Image (cartoon, coloured by chain):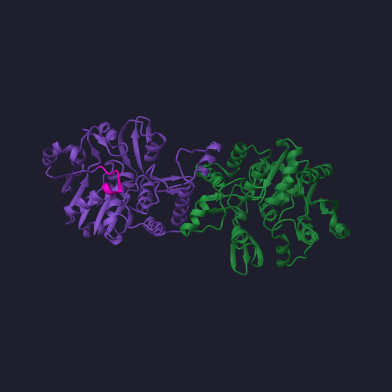
Chain colours: A purple, B green
Amino acid sequence: MIVALAGGIGAAKLLLGFSKLLPPNQLTVIGNTGDDIELFGLRICPDLDTITYTLSEKINPETGWGLQDDSFECVRALQDLGAPSWFRLGDRDLATHLWRTSLLQQGHSLTQVTARICEAFGTPCRLLPMTDSYTPTYLVTEQGELHVQEYLVREKCRPLVRAPKYLNIKEAQPAPGVADAIAKAEGVFLCPSNPFISIGPILAIPGVRELLIQTEAPVFAVTPIVGRRALKGPAAKMLAELGYPLSPTAVAGLYKDFLNVFVLDEQDRQLRAEIEGLGLKVVTINTIMSSIGDKIDLARELLELI
Amino acid sequence: MIVALAGGIGAAKLLLGFSKLLPPNQLTVIGNTGDDIELFGLRICPDLDTITYTLSEKINPETGWGLQDDSFECVRALQDLGAPSWFRLGDRDLATHLWRTSLLQQGHSLTQVTARICEAFGTPCRLLPMTDSYTPTYLVTEQGELHVQEYLVREKCRPLVRAPKYLNIKEAQPAPGVADAIAKAEGVFLCPSNPFISIGPILAIPGVRELLIQTEAPVFAVTPIVGRRALKGPAAKMLAELGYPLSPTAVAGLYKDFLNVFVLDEQDRQLRAEIEGLGLKVVTINTIMSSIGDKIDLARELLELI
């Protein structure tokens, strides 16, 4: 059984590859819920939904988030009312949030609710939220503290980031199943996700780092930085603003206490020795996933590493 | 200044007539919020919205509720997920509920939120919720207790009703402005609304009956029953099931402690003496409102009664 720690869009590409090669019960995804937001009374879990929609092949392929062929009547009406409308809620996407909120209010845990949503979508993996608690990530920026969705969506990643802040995380516990999955895994993969706002929140839950240190399974991280650029999102900008070199080596350094193998992109093979200097094994593969073929190829090569 | 106590669809017809004859600051509507429901984490106020949408001429004319030309993608997606989808939420209608919920969670009162929504829609009246508290109406039925929306929408009024039950009503207060409006009115009108689930909840708020008894303004009730049938909804069925004669006289009897004038439909003029026997003045007018002309005509005749 394979375990993957995952953020949203970047991670979902690799997970789609895994899901084409593994039966659903052999792939456990631990999804970041640090980017969850409570908006309009609704609990919205963007990363969990991106994984659910991508793996069930209902994702909007143009944006990488939201549902294919969705409409935006509700958000247009919010705009017409003069209400906040920066968060682009599709009409069909909204149904997921309404149902989730309703089930949570009935007393179901996020783990249970996520399982029901995945079942309804036919998602071919076991998707666990990192925790059942609400632990939103905030970013301390030059404009003050912003919820990660405000930073990503409303502010389009423009403000300079000084530090991430994982709210309520010290009181949070890994969701049921997380510890067991990591302990029993044959291999653990950190998807090519942002180290501060996707993987960082998962690692900040008390006990998770220790689980990764203790597991007998090899732990792999796939670089989210290729050729000094982020594959997706603001990872490169955040590395620089937080005082790290803009390099895969910096990401490898963040994980070196529990990591066994760092998966570097072929383009960056000259960094191999530098990362090996951190005490890590390094593998170089093509990590750029454009086509579905690329995703399956990368997933297959990663599985062969175990 | 005129005050109208109002339920939803039936009331909104008459209110539209009033709004064509009076400037917005001369028409205060006290809307039933007993049919409010918390669904999917959202606060939904069907009667307030029906009034808002009707008076701002954005109502769906075919149903009498919801917005004109709305789409139903979200509710279709709920259905596809296997989530409860009996409450027919239009996509644009949803924006009203999302915005309301958001403002309530920010600490605004329902009175303030309703004013903002009316302003955004350009609603030509002052619409007050009957109370800022959440006081949902339940119906004790042969199938157990049902929220009034479950009864009306999900169960299509089929279960036999044994009693209405106004939850939390004893602790509720009239919303700010309600007492003052009734005290200062030149005329108070009970719209042709259901006496048990539309007008009943308003009258059940501690103090409201006393305000109606004490006001110097004449208090009028427009019959919701014409020719032994309800103009709209289950009023006739409920009268019968609750042990009342199926007659405007029964409705007049429910209001006789504070009412001055009962407005009877011409079709039922033979009941005049019976209702006068309750100690009420009786006026007979055509109360059936099909066209916009009918609505304005009835509103004009009512205003002339003052």
Q: Quadrant of the C terminus of chain A?
A: bottom left
Nearer-the-camera pick, B179 or B192: B192
Up-down relation of residue B192 to residue A155 (above or below):
below
Q: Residue A196: image x %, image y %?
A: 28, 40
Q: Residue B273: image x %, image y %?
A: 88, 59
Q: Residue A165: image x %, image y %?
A: 32, 40
Q: Residue A45: image x %, image y %?
A: 39, 48
What span is colored magenta in the figure? A288-294
Left or right of A214 in this view: B18? right
User: What is the tally of numbered marks visible in this picture?
Assistant: 0
Q: Quadrant of the N terminus of chain A?
A: bottom left
In the rendered image, is residue B7 in sight? no
Nearer-the-camera pick, B180 or A74: A74
Nearer-the-camera pick, A259 or A248: A248
Left or right of B267 in this view: B112? left
Residue A172 painted magenta: no
- Picture residue at 47% right of the left edge, 49% below the top: A94
Within the image, what quadrant is residue B230 found in?
Answer: bottom right
In the rendered image, is residue A238 in sight? yes
